[in-house]
Image (cartoon, rainbow, N blue to C red):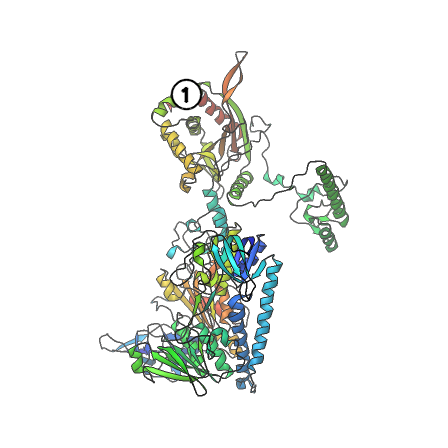
Amino acid sequence: MVVGDIATGTDVLVIGAGPGGYVAAIRAGQLDLDVTLVEKDAYGGSCLNHGCIPSKAMITAADVAHEAGNAEEMGVHADPAVDLAKMVEWKDGVVDQLTSGVEKLNKANGVNLIEGRAEFADENSVRVAHGGEGQGSETVEFEHAIIATGSRPIEIPGFSYEDEPVLSSRDALALDSLPDSMVVVGAGYIGMELSTVFAKLGTDVTVVEMLDDVLPGYEDDVKRIVRDRAESLGIDFHFGRTASGWEEVDDGIRVSTETVDEEAAAEADGGAAETFDADKVLVAVGRQPVTDTLNLEAAGIEPNDDGFIETDDRARTEQDHIFAVGDVAGEPMLAHKGSKEGEVAAEVIAGEPAALDYQAVPAAVFTDPEVGTVGLTEAEAEDAGFTPVVGQFPFRASGRALTTGEDEGFVRVVADEDSGFILGAQVVGPEASELIAEFGLAIEMGATLEDVASTVHTHPTLAEGVMEACANALGHAIHALNR
Amino acid sequence: MVREFKLPDVGEGVSEGEIVQWLVDEGDAVEEDQPVAEVETDKAIVEVPSPVDGTVRDINAEEGEMVPVGTVIITFDVEGEADEPAEETAEPAGDDAASEPAGDAGSETAVDADEEVETPEGRVFAAPSARRLARELGVDIAAVEGSGPSGRVTEQDVRAAAEDDEAEPEPATAETTTGGADDGATAEADAGAVSADSAQTGGATGGTAASVESADRDRTLAAPATRKLAEEEGVDLNAVPATEERDGEPFVTPEAVREYAQAQQEAQRADTEALARREEPAEREVREPYRGVRKSIGDQMEQSKYTAPHITHHDTVDVTNLVETRERLKVEAEDRGIRLTYMPLVMKAVTAALKEFPMVNASLDEENEEIVKKQYYNVGVATATDAGLMVPVVDDVDRKGLLQIASEMNEKVQKARDRSISIDEMQGGTFTITNIGGIGGEYATPIINYPEVAILALGTIEQRPVVEDGEVVARHTLPLSLSADHRIVDGADAARFTNRVKEYLKQPELLLLE
């Protein structure tokens, strides 16, 4: 207790108002608990303010611009002009609407909101330092705490986000003018999504990736479709390279790169060391959990070697009364996983029989085309001891896909051959992020191939592909050839 | 070596296909099953997978070209294989080149009921609602056998597992009934008669505002305006006594709704006035969630009571000899480190009687319409624990000595109390005994530990007045209450069985003949 502190007590203290924290707070409020939510920056966290939502807004706007200028085939001739400042303003409006919605929902559910940065004083209290000079701090004593501090973009040596030409994903979504050229370090999902946005808006994009392909962790045929499309948009890929530093040159910056191994050096066009000139460099090499600002030691919690807080299937940390949800609680770092964890943590605190026992967490990449995955790949199913059977449906055989002008990619389902239980799916193509939801439900309900193949799907829709892929696995797809 | 790859027969009666797109270039490394080309036939497109790990040597067909089935469209260099010409046709669609016709892969989803459904990694296939129910009922869902398609675990499966796991509750409050011996001549309770057939009650009420009989139907016909009125008055339409019928269904008029609402309001007012005259506690009502063990017990009770029409037979036995016998044996048992209560003696007596009345040691297999008479005697002992009621079972009581039964029972009851008892130690019972006497009381109406068909409740053994040769004397007596499933056990059987138990308890030495 610091002299001059005001101390308040609460049943549930939630630290961080991102999709993990605010959902936990609202759910706890619904369950008649006294809830206090501490947020240092903006309601909605990275997801609403600097991640999922603004990036999707920009992707949509970039798609509109790109499609309008590339629809001669459909008889549409246009040469769209892009006003990035206006685009960002529109995106900010969307973000504001959502974040104020989150604030209202919290208030409506009786959640006490405190603005400031929380750190643990001991196992049952935090000190919240309010921003600004002379704002002081207060102590909050809690019965239960939910840590939901999220993650931040990883910095790499030689590239500080403090420097104006070096952009994090957050900075890239807040530019007021379009750079002529950009180097993107990292071809993971964030790097690929933003590369696509800027390429479509007219920026010359060069991507430097340490590994040998885009979207690490995805299957080769999925990567190929995304990479080919990106290349056709003019994105220039350099695989097997790391960015080592940058310097200012006449009218921009020069990013230096190195090959990761000698073999790559021999094959590389520019030799072992190669430089790329650009206006900006965007670093998107991943995210790391925010656990270093919390004084976790005082709460008796120690993050693991990767900085994550380990939790059990009730979202509990090593301290029974302290929970951790969202990015800070480990991979996969996905907003929807955090929200589910937040919900479960709140219910567990309220004494409900809740647990994290979902069977699969879907993931989407909003590249062009989109990628949606859930559950196991064929190889993973095999490793898990199943005898997988695979069904696939190419969008080229989908009437609806053809009418959208987007017919690349496929729907693939992985199931257990003996029982027919659906184990996973990979969709790459138009609206893959939406289509994957049906497979998520199928897996969670323990549905079989037959269940989905026998469900009448609307015609003409992309979702028919889900039905057809399942029918294909059973050997009776109608609009695709069966094995 | 070089592998030639011919355009496979990509479908029923298809003789040619168009190469839509090559997915690989000459010189590319390919892995087995990696799609190398997309081939289109009328109305369908299929990806053709590589048959080998290797490198693309030549591509022999142009994109857009129509190619007859069997034409070599691509060749591969394969490392490490003997260099001899070989050709390959693969099956279309990227699956694990199965050599069997892929016609109904995965369509054999029927699971042999007797077969254990083993899934890799202990994966359980069940909907989230079933998982939550399992947590609520404290059931390990991984141990539940699923009855759904391919062995999917349903909510019903979880409930059934919970019922197997859960103890049968001992009647916590002994409700004494006024009934004496049921001689089997009483009318059988018809479960259907319990729910008042609202169609027949039509017109029976609705007269005076003072009567607030609620009808409790599942379905009620009424005009939309009447429904709206019911909503405004906060009245459940199904509870309003029906004054008319339409199409054989109860029909409620606006007048009936108003009368019912008024009657309810008056009744509430009367309640309120009555309450106002009483001392007000701080909180008028405390609501607690009905779940977990409490709910499991409730569910089990409900199932038993609504499935098995219960009869209860009450009697008293003079246990003077039993008391003396136990006093003598107790000392002997203590020397061997075993605490001997009356329960093992009663278990022995009951088992001896069960052998003579197999109907009481049975269960009813409703599904197959068979009565299952059990030739083994596993007796459950209802035990009150902090976590609720549990019924540890002592197996094969007929084959065990008193002291073994005593030590097994003591051990299991203790395990039930400290919650270390395993599920299988509470399963497989054929008859249950519940001892209410420990807490107090004489007679009760115990609820059968379904699917068993009978349960015996013991009152307190104490001295009560008994008439002997015209004289009133003090004797140790034991009140007995036997509930039985009237579907299997008639009143006469219940009485005869109880009489036999009484004989053994009256003269415990008879057990030596067993």
Tell me if residue A248 comes above or below residue A216 in the rendering. below
Name which residue lies at 71% across and 49% down. Answer: B234
* Residue lying farthest to the top in this orientation: B470
- Residue A451 visible to the viewer: no
Element at label 1: helix
User: In this orientation, which residue lies closer to the viewer: A139 or B51?
Assistant: A139
Could you say where residue B157 lies in the image, as x and y percent from the top left? Answer: 47, 49
Measuring 25% from the left and 76% from the top, which residue is drawn there? B79
Q: Residues within 10 Å of mark 1 (few under 14, many from 20)?
A: some
Which image quadrant: the C terminus of chain B? Answer: top left
Residue B441 in the figure: left or right of residue B406: right
Q: Position of residue A147 (x, y in %)?
A: 49, 59
Horizontal and vertical percent position of residue A181? 46, 84
> Residue B159, relative to residue B457: is it above or below?
below
- Specify whether residue B334 is in view: yes
Q: Nearer the viewer, residue A307 or B485?
A: A307
Residue holding disc 1: B327
Q: Chain of mark 1?
A: B
Viewer-closest of A480 and B350: B350
Which three-letter amino acid code belongs to the residue tagged 1? Glu
Residue B61: image location, x then y, percent: 36, 84
